[in-house]
Image: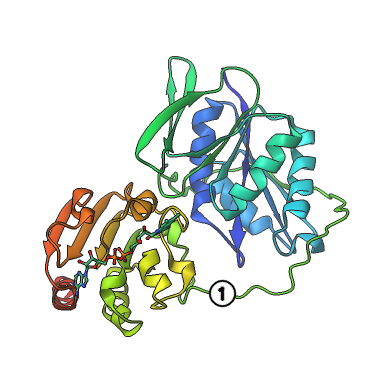
């Protein structure tokens, strides 16, 4: 049965995050030929980004612009999105399973007295029902869920549901809605960027991750160079973060970020279960480790037994040669 589905879009520094487009793709599956309505909150003119959501498949987009929405707060965005949902009465809501999504959607679900399927990695229409696949036990198994009655509310893991192709011949209205934002008790004074290049690990397509095997902050330099030539970004194990070789914002794993890049190269990482929880669903995993018995090889598609300080420079040279 076709449904009206709201997609909660996400922007950062004036650009939509790719997961917004993936959420539109997910919403189109859930809506089953119904209507996909984008909602975008922020401050200033959001119409261009709203238009972009249309080009990626939203039937129409509602923007809520307000000084109080300049930076994300649970209360501000919660009020703005809730106001749109009250107007629209959708049968489905989809958002990215990002920091904002993880924060905002449980609050909305509780206010709407609805359930929530979080962190879906696949959505398929099966025999008239929508089936969501999501990881459980830190990614060691997957469960399938259906919502047979009531609001279909879900967050989707970035990099799992392919975004639609951009099509600027698509048309749809981009309208604004005024929402009075009351009682924000959280004041964001400043935002301090931690990762060096601004690439969000959870959306990165290529990640070169370093572990305690890199031995020092300088040991990350070849990894950064490999990330550069492959157009990727650098991540880390908690071992490397705890040792002070890099910032905790790079940590991947159970208590760090969950990533699903196309290519994950683990350098000097043993493969502790807590690390695997954050990266084992990467599409292709390459492990470089001196120890042939290292657990990381159990999840790797390609394993290289060797010293990362010999192997990584060779990889950099090979990739450079391929580009010539
Ligand atoms: P190590 O286990 O010390 O492994 C280093 C590896 O480098 C070894 O396999 C070694 O053979 C190899 N090596 C050394 N030198 C070289 C070289 N020159 N070339 C190639 N290989 C080399 N960990 C996470 O990563 N993320 C998490 O989110 C996380 N959450 C946790 C939560 C809890 C509650 C707990 C208890 C632990 C958590 N941990 C997490 C920690 C985890 O258990 C491991 O301690 C950590 O992942 C180990 O990091 P590592 O693989 O870099 O270091």
Q: Position of residue 70 (x, y in %)?
A: 74, 64
Which residue is rendered at x = 27% and y = 64% of the image?
269
As rendered, which of 229 and 167 lies closer to the eye? 229
Residue occupying the far top of the picture: 127
Q: How is the image coloured?
A: rainbow
Which residue is rendered at x = 53% and y = 29% of the image?
30
Which residue is rendered at x = 47% and y = 45% of the image?
157
As rendered, which of 200 and 14 lies closer to the eye? 200
Q: Quadrant of residue 217?
A: bottom left
| Left-right relation of 163 to 11 | left
Q: Is residue 39 visible?
A: yes
Q: Quadrant of residue 170?
A: top right
Which residue is rendered at x = 28% and y = 69% of the image?
230
Q: How many marks?
A: 1
Look at the picture and state if 273 lies above or below 118: below
Look at the picture and state if 120 lies above or below 18: above
Q: Residues within 10 Å of mark 1 (few under 14, many from 20)?
A: few
| Left-right relation of 302 to 237 | left
**Label 1 secondary element:** loop
| Left-right relation of 149 to 269 | right
Residue named by callout 1: 193
Q: Is residue 236 visible?
A: no
Look at the picture and state if 26 lies above or below 214: above
Q: Position of residue 121 (x, y in %)?
A: 42, 39
Quick one: quadrant of the C terminus? Answer: bottom left
Q: Position of residue 102 (x, y in %)?
A: 59, 48
**Ligand 1 positioned in quadrant:** bottom left
Q: Position of residue 89 (x, y in %)?
A: 74, 29
| Left-right relation of 105 to 316 | right
């Amino acid at each position: 049965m076709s449904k009206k589905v709201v997609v909660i879009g996400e922007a950062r520094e004036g650009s939509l995050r790719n997961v917004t487009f993936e959420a539109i793709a997910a919403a189109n599956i859930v809506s089953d030929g119904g209507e996909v309505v984008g909602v975008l909150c922020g401050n200033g003119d959001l119409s261009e980004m709203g238009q972009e959501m249309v080009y990626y498949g939203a039937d129409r987009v509602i923007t809520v612009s307000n000084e109080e929405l300049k930076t994300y707060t649970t209360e501000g965005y919660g009020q703005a999105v809730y106001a749109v949902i009250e107007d629209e009465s959708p049968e489905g809501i989809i958002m990215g399973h990002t920091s904002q999504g993880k924060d905002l959607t449980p609050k909305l679900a509780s206010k709407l007295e609805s359930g929530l399927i979080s962190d879906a990695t696949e959505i398929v229409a099966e025999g008239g029902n929508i089936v969501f696949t999501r990881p459980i036990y830190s990614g060691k198994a997957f469960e399938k869920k259906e919502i047979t009655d009531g609001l279909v509310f879900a967050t989707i893991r970035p990099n799992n549901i392919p975004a639609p192709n951009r099509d600027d011949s698509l048309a749809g209205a981009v309208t604004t809605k005024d929402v009075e934002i009351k009682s924000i008790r959280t004041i964001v004074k400043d935002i301090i960027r931690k990762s060096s290049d601004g690439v969000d690990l959870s959306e990165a397509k290529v990640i070169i991750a370093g572990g305690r095997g890199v031995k020092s902050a300088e040991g990350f330099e070849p990894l950064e160079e490999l990330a550069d030539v492959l157009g990727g970004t650098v991540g880390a194990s908690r071992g490397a973060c705890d040792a002070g070789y890099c910032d905790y914002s790079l940590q991947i794993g159970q208590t760090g970020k969950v990533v699903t890049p196309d290519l994950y190269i683990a350098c000097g990482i043993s493969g502790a279960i807590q690390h695997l929880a954050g990266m084992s669903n990467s599409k292709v995993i390459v492990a470089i480790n001196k120890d042939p018995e290292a657990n990381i090889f159990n999840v790797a598609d390609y394993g290289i037994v060797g010293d990362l300080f010999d192997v990584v420079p060779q990889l950099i040279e090979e990739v450079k040669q391929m580009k010539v």
